[in-house]
Image: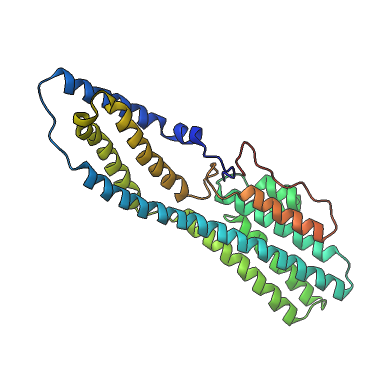
Amino acid sequence: MIVGATPRFRQIMFEVWKPLTILFVWDVAVTAFHFMTPIKEPPLPTALFGTAIALFMGFRTNAAYARWWEARTLWGALINASRSLSRFTLSLSAASNTGNDLHRDVIRRQIAFANALRCQLRKESVRGEIDRSAGVLLAEATAYESNPANAILNSISLVFANELSAGRIDTIQQATVERILIDIANAQGGMERIKNTPLPNGFRFFPNLFTRIFCLLLPVALVESLGVATPIGSTLIGLIFLAVLSIGDDLTDPFANSVHDVPLTAMCRTIEINLLEAARLEAPAPITPVGGVLW
C-alpha cells in the first residue's frame, strides 16, 4: 500500500508507459497524415464518447475500491478478534492457575494462522511461516492440508476442547472462545471470497476496449484544432484515461502482493507484536514503509 502523500508519477508512468508510447506514435502518425495529405478527418463526437467512458470507468473504479476497502475491513476484524482471543485466553490461564502455557500455545497458533492466511491469499509458500510462528510439529500437521490456515484454526479449537475435557475450563468459557473463532473464520471466508471471485468479465473487458478505442479516435478529433501540438495534447488526455484504467485494475485484487494492495505483512506483524507482548514475550519490530510503500 502506498502511504506517501506525494503522488507517485513515476509509478503511474511505469504502469502505463507501453500503451502510452504506442498512443504517442499513433498521434504523431495521425498528425503527419493530416498535414501531408489533402484528406481531412471527419468530425467525431469525442466529448460525448469520453463522458460516457468516464462514467463507466468511474463506476468500475468504485466497484474495485469497494473490494479493496472490504478486504481492509476484514483484516481489521481479524486483528481485533486476534486480540480478543489472546485477552480471553490470558484471563483463562490466570483464573485456572495453569500458568502461561495455554496462552502462549494459543497465541503462537494464532500468529501462525494470520501469516498462513496472508501467504495463501498472496499465493506464496505457507510452510516457512507456520514453522517460524508455531513450530515444526504444527507445520508437519498442516503440510497436507489444502487450507493450512483453516487447519490451524481447527487446532486452536481442539486446544480448548482438550482444556474442557480436562476440566480446566467450563462449557460457557469454551462457547465464548468458539464465538471468537467464528468471527475469525468469517473474516477468513470473506477474504477468500474476494480472492477467488474476480470482477465480472464485462467490468474488466469493456473499459479496456472502450478506453483504447477512445484513445485511437482522440487525435483524429483534435488534430484540426491542435495542429502540430496534437501528439502532446492527445497523449496527455490518454494518460489520464490509462492511469484511471490502471488504478481500477490494481484495486481489483487487493491480495496480489503489489504496491497498491492491502498491507498484509504489516498487519500480520501487528497481530504478532500485540499477542507476543500480551504474553510477555519478545516481539519483533513493526514493519516500516520501504520507498513509500507499506507491504
- Taking 227 as reference, is 143 left or right? right
The quarter of the displayed image where residue 84 is located: bottom right
Q: Quadrant of the C terminus?
A: top right
Q: Nearer the viewer, residue 288 or 197?
A: 288
Q: Quadrant of residue 281?
A: bottom right
Image point 55% across, 44% down: which residue?
257
Residue drawn 57% across the image and 54% down it: 146
> Along the line of sight, which residue is nearer the eye, 193 or 157?
193
Is the image coloured rainbow, by chain, by secondary structure, or in one colour? rainbow
Q: Is residue 228 above or below residue 177?
A: above
- Residue 250 x %, y %: 46, 45
Q: Is residue 246 above or below residue 185?
A: above
Q: Position of residue 164 (x, y in %)?
A: 77, 76
Quarter-of-image position of residue 3: top right
Please say whether residue 2 is visible from this viewpoint. Answer: yes
Count the numbered circles shown: 0
**Would you say 235 lies left or right of 76 here?**
left
Q: Is residue 9 above or below residue 295?
A: above
Name the foreground residue: 125 vs 68.
Answer: 68
Q: Decide: is 69 above or below 209.
A: below
- Counting from the top left corner in percent of width and height, residue 134 is at 75, 53
In the image, farthest residue toward the left: 38
Q: From this viewpoint, which residue is outermost toward the front?
A: 225
Residue at the image point whose x is 35% and y is 48% from the top: 204
Q: Is residue 198 visible?
A: no
User: Residue 111, position in %: x, y?
Assistant: 71, 56
Residue at 17% x, 23% y is 34
